[in-house]
Amino acid sequence: MLSTRMVLSALALAVVSLSGVSTAQTIDPATQAKLTEVDTRFKAADKNADGKLTLQEAKDGMPRIADAFSHIDIEKKGYVTLEQIRAVMIKSGR
């Protein structure tokens, strides 16, 4: 039997997935091009390919992200993810 926590987690994942679809449909071509560039630069900067950028990795490969690191890493985990960077870009309209 599924626990309440598992059901809520699955529901949250579904909502996030669906919201990504609608967001992707409303992004203008210029913003989409910037997001694609960020995807490429993130992969290059993520030297250990763990899906996370430390502050040092950001300094080495994405200096503008390094400058905004504390703003993006709001949970103070010591790293940022591509999803966090993309969300900040979309929110700020950059």
Image (cartoon, rainbow, N blue to C red):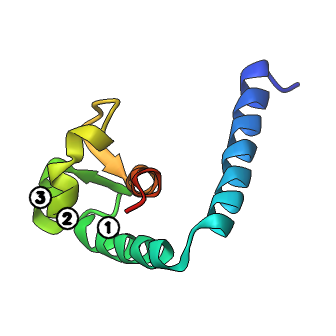
Q: Earlier in the sequence, mark 1 or mark 2?
A: 1
Amino acid identity at mark 3: Lys
Task: Give coordinates of residue 14: x percent, y percent.
Answer: 75, 46
Q: CA distance from mark 1 to mark 2?
A: 7 Å
Q: Earlier in the sequence, mark 3 or mark 1?
A: 1
Q: Residue at x 41, y 49 (%)?
A: 84
Q: CA distance from mark 2 to mark 3?
A: 6 Å
Find disc 2 in the rendering and name its residue: 62
Q: 83 or 90, which lies in front?
A: 90
What secondary structure is marked by label 3?
A: helix
**Would you say the residues marked 3 and 1 are in contact, meaning their CB atoms lie under 8 Å apart?**
no
**Would you say the residues marked 1 and 2 are in contact, meaning their CB atoms lie under 8 Å apart?**
yes
Amino acid identity at mark 2: Met
Task: Give coordinates of residue 63: x percent, y percent.
Answer: 14, 62
Count of numbered labels shown in the rendering: 3
- Residue 13 visible to an observer of this rendering: yes
